[in-house]
Amino acid sequence: MSDSNQTRAQQLIGDFAPKLVDLTDNVLFGDIWERSGLSPRDRSLVTVASLITSGSTDQLRGHLVRAKANGLTETELKEAIIHLAFYAGWPKAMSAITVAKEIFTS
């Protein structure tokens, strides 16, 4: 399978941790993200908030892109980060806004 046909998980860790790729592709994104109980937009907002509060900036990059594709605006995402500064902590918000700036200005 060429790189362009692989999922991001396959590209990053496919040969190193195939079971984690399987769970990521088939359970997380194949099942959980496709459930009808929340809209993709709402799932993205919850996921972005969770990644910010846990300080998971590596995963935040891709999820900010996904959030925009799922209908969240740049302004809404910046406001979520500002709001979370008071709940998740200033350093986590500053790290998140730096990632957001990279994503939104590139």
Image (tube, rainbow, N blue to C red):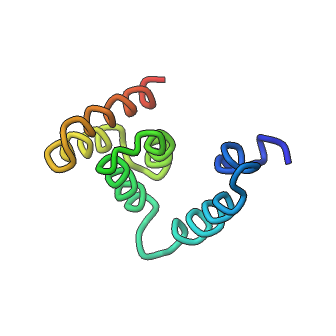
Outermost residue on the left side: it is 86
- Image height of 9 relative to 93, above or below: below
Which residue does the image show at 26% across and 32% down from the upper left? Answer: 94
- Please provide percent x and percent y for residue 5: 78, 47
Q: In this view, does 60 lie to the left or right of 1?
A: left
Q: Nearer the viewer, residue 42 or 94?
A: 94
- Please provide percent x and percent y for residue 26: 65, 67
- Image height of 28 relative to 58, above or below: below
Outermost residue on the front side: it is 16
- Image height of 23 relative to 92, above or below: below
Q: In this view, does 37 lie to the left or right of 92?
A: right
Which residue does the image show at 26% across and 46% down from the upper left? Answer: 80
Q: In this view, does 5 lie to the left or right of 34?
A: right
Q: In this view, does 59 lie to the left or right of 15?
A: left
Q: How many marks?
A: 0
Q: Nearer the viewer, residue 44 or 84?
A: 84
- Please provide percent x and percent y for residue 6: 75, 48
The part of the image, by quadrant, that contains residue 2 is top right
Which residue does the image show at 78% across and 41% down from the upper left? Answer: 3
Which residue does the image show at 18% across and 45% down from the upper left? Answer: 83
- Please provide percent x and percent y for residue 28: 56, 65
Outermost residue on the right side: it is 1
